[in-house]
Image: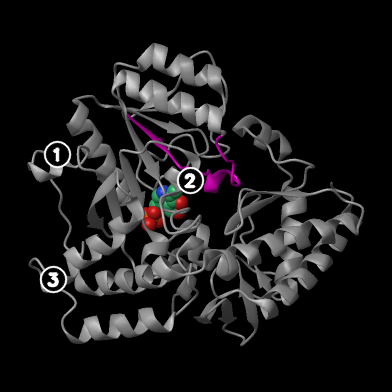
Amino acid sequence: MIPSNEVLPGGVSSGARALGVLDGRDFVVASSKGAWLTDTYGTRFVDYGMAMGANLLGHADPAVVEACIAALRSGSMPGFSNDQESRAADALVRIGGERVTRATFTTTGTEAVQLAIRAARGKTGRQLVAKTVGGYDGWLDNVRFGLVESPETERTNTRPVQLDVTLLRVNDMNDLDELFREYGNDLAAILIEPILGNTACLVPTPEWIARLNALCAQYGVKIISDEVMAGLRTGFGLVADTIGLNADYVSMGKAIGTGVPVAALLGTQDAFSVFADGSVPRFGTYHGNPLVCAALIATTDFLSTADYQTGLFDYGAKMRAGIVEAYKAEGLSVCTAGFDAVFSLWFTETPPATYDAAMAALNPTASRLNYEALRRNGVIALPSPWGRYFASFSHGAEELEVTLAAFRAAAASVAEAKCV
Ligand SMILES: Cc1ncc(COP(=O)(O)O)c(C=O)c1O
């Protein structure tokens, strides 16, 4: 018989998902509930991957599960317009405030981003899109460009362009001004994560965002805020609004469905005129089916009345402080970057502000030792030095205790290796 990890190459369908063998044990999840994962050996772990951010409420949230069961019973794929779809759109646009009032569904975040690009091109009649150095906006070729540590992120005299996509550098004013001087009249859109979750939670500064808003308004360039990862993690509103980014389009996914595959594109009335008049087409067999809409409605019902401060932010703040404390006890200075509901750990005194600074600050050895010690002590986090910790509404006192004990072990292991 062919081994199962050869039938399914590497044992996974998405590259970033395989954690590999540690101390002779592989890591394959048998079940997940709340903030915990149970592997095939029956060992339980506090989870900070949270399905790359998809489980903001926690794994297998009971209200979401019940809503999905009911939707399956009444037919999950009617194939025609269904009453759940507009209910879900109404539920979702509550987060958009007064400006961002329109929504349409896709199945994955990758598709939501592509639809935003198509809409922005239709709206402006221009082709070129600028995405951020280090930003991850889905797995398709046009945006699989400028990812962390890729050759095109290196500074050269010419701005790289591939498949009508070019790059810009967050928090670099000169680069922003140069981009618009060179390409301002060719640009359809700027595609940006409001917090660069895939670049260890680099946060754009208010000054840089203000300049970006002003240049986009001046040149008629659309802003796509890619909130697939960070969405709903700063409260029941757009992350773009939290940081002052004037988004025309907002791609969302992951947390809006609590682990059920649903994604969406939101936008202003003006930005969505290309869908309203049919000049930009939308397709997708699974988009907006009753099953995923039920999950979305149950999720937004919870989040719209949730106390984010006590239910989520306080936990993240205590965890961040506890990590710094654990390392300090070993004589090491570390810091965290991002928001309390999603943050990264840096083995530096202050978080890097730019991609170049992040590259210089990267410490793969410390990141690996930290990850391995956490895993040995009952905590699963993302192994990459660019990774991040996702807290959820299911993380509480018990999880915090296990987590901080694991971080004390991790700090000791990193200190012993003298790699910071
Ligand atoms: C910011 C961002 N955009 C887009 C995507 C792609 O979403 P999906 O994996 O659902 O296609 C991701 C996935 O991690 C993401 O983090």
Asked if residue 281 lies left or right of residue 43, the reply is left
Q: Is residue 230 above or below residue 273?
A: below
Q: Which mark is residue 24?
A: none
Disc 3 residue type?
Answer: Asp
Residue under numbered circle 3:
83
Disc 1 residue type?
Answer: Val
- Is mark 2 in CB contact (under 8 Å) with mark 1? no
**In front of the other: label 2 or label 3?**
2
Secondary structure found at label 1: helix
| Mark earlier in primary sequence (2, 1) | 2
Give the CA separation, mark 2 to mark 3: 32 Å
Question: Does 202 lie within the magenta span?
Answer: yes
Residue under numbered circle 2:
242
Q: Nearer the viewer, residue 374 or 93?
A: 93
Quadrant holding the N terminus: bottom left
Asked if residue 51 lies left or right of residue 68, the reply is right
Q: Which mark is residue 274?
A: 1
Query: What residue is rendered at 58% in x and 82% in y?
Result: 38
Query: What residue is rendered at 19% in x and 77% in y?
Result: 76
Label 2 within 8 A of ligand 1 by Cβ: no
